[in-house]
Image (spheres, grey):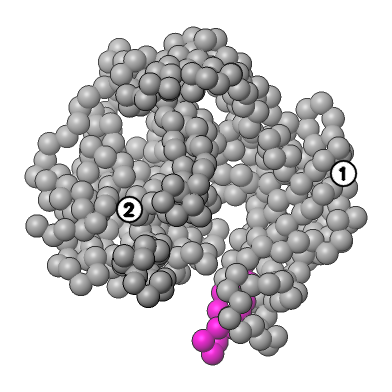
Amino acid sequence: MLKIKSGITILTTVIIISACGGGNDSKTPQESTTSPTPFTTEFQSTLSLQKDAEPAIQISSSKSNQKDEINAYSVTHHFDSGSSSIILSYNFDRNDTNKTLHVNYDPILKKVLNISIGENYLKPDIFSFSKEDIFSCSNTVLFEPCKNIQIVFDEQTGFSKINFDNTKLSNLPTVRLSPIENPDNQLSTEKSYITLNGQITGSLSRPPQTFNNIRKTSQSSLLSNQKPVSLMGAVYDPKTKVILFGTHANNGIDSSLKLAQFSTGIENNLIQYSLLSTETSFYMSGMCSAMTLTFPVEDVATLQSNKNTDNISLTFNQAIYKDKKDLPPLFPNFPIQPECAQAQLQLDGSVTVNIPSTQLQISPILKNESSFSLVQPALYFDVINHDRQQFGNNALQVKIRNNQIEKIDFKDTRIGKNPTTGLLVDYTEYQYNCGYNEACTGLSYDIEKNKISFDNTTLTSKKSPANEVNNHITLNGVFDFAGR
């Protein structure tokens, strides 16, 4: 048997088992009371996975129906913090969502943004990136770009076809610090690759939901470099006091559209900063290479904000965002040459965003603590295939099927020093949920506003807690989607 470290060891084992049939027909308490409408999802595969120099594993085709908790193939229209994409997911183990290949696709650019095994989309926090079982490609400095991919996708039917030709996914390099492993006190790194070859096609028996099924609350009238642009959406996060929105625009690198993501901080109705994250060009290894970087607006005085009870408006008056090539690069030894094209955007117009109403009180996690509050709303909203939805943030996630709340997950992450090195951050996750073994109670859901009201809703620890940790927590108050 092929042995691959961490989560990939399990992945390769289960691929062979799941190809023989079987399934998980277990139901949550909510599911047992209704008879779901018949449907199927499936993928056909000639795909192979090969980790480093080990033997390749062939991925068998798979099919699921309404009785399966995990779909063989899923189409997710994903909106997160002002930007959107479509995630195509091919599950290799119907008992475990972590054994899934996810392809994050931009339907406007017709481009693969990232591919991952181990997470349903790449999250921008170091705790997700540091997991050993995540293998990815992405146009970020942490991973290598996604290459040698041909993709066809029909948004009306959900059909997809992807060809891979030596497409490489990598994990993050593992840094060895122990003097036992490094007697010369030199840093050493280990990096592994998974190579994809072959074709995979996915199909649904029922058309998927689309972005039109995600509540639209923002309004905009914007020009980017004197040309009208439409937003994928815009949200306001009361926790960080930031407005986030994304669009596709020509940023001056070449004649094609690029993804442009904006974040603007506001304090006491005054603009504190405004940043643009977009593709720019760097001179590396004898050529100009694309890289996604973030740079600030030249003058915050070119932005104005106005807040009332229900919304906040941003006005842009010749607001210029420009990659000046004079910011310290992430890697100081990279030569940066002026002949490479530089990204530049000028924004004019306005954006108006909804003010969410999230106000949650949560009982203590540790027995020696007090209750705490949560004011951050749901910043992402996913519509999955024809019948599922989920929305949330890094702490709280709500899963919905056929417009009824199915499951709720809560996660609290505590950060501290690594007890061995005293340098690297160490973290502990406390996870609670309902809807898996016990029904979610004491709540009501406003479908039109994507708002949940909690009244002493009990969540239970995912695993047996330590003596100092409470086995249950309760939620009271309101949690809602920030809007799009």
The location of residue 221, given as percent across then percent down, is 78, 49
Q: Main secondary structure of the magenta part?
A: strand
Residue drawn at (69%, 69%), measured in percent from left and top?
Answer: 251
Is 266 displayed left or right of 120 in the figure?
right
Location of residue 241 by image quarter: top right
Question: What type is the residue that disc 1 sits on?
Answer: Leu
Q: Is residue 287 magenta-colored?
A: yes
Q: Is residue 48 visible?
A: yes
Question: What type is the residue that disc 2 sits on?
Answer: Asp
State whether residue 185 is above or below residue 132: below
State whether residue 433 is above or below residue 252: above
Q: Which mark is residue 133?
A: 2
Disc 2 secondary structure class: loop
Query: Around disc 2, counting alpha carbons within 10 Å, would you say few (fewer than 14), some (14 to 19), or many (20 or more)?
Result: many
Is 66 displayed left or right of 479 in the figure?
left
Residue drawn at (56%, 49%), measured in percent from left and top?
Answer: 84
Disc 1 secondary structure class: strand
Q: Which mark is residue 270?
A: 1
The numbered mark, 1 or 2, whose residue comes first in the sequence reads 2
The location of residue 468, given as percent across then percent down, is 43, 22
Q: Which residues are magenta?
A: 279-290
The location of residue 7, given as percent across then percent down, is 27, 50
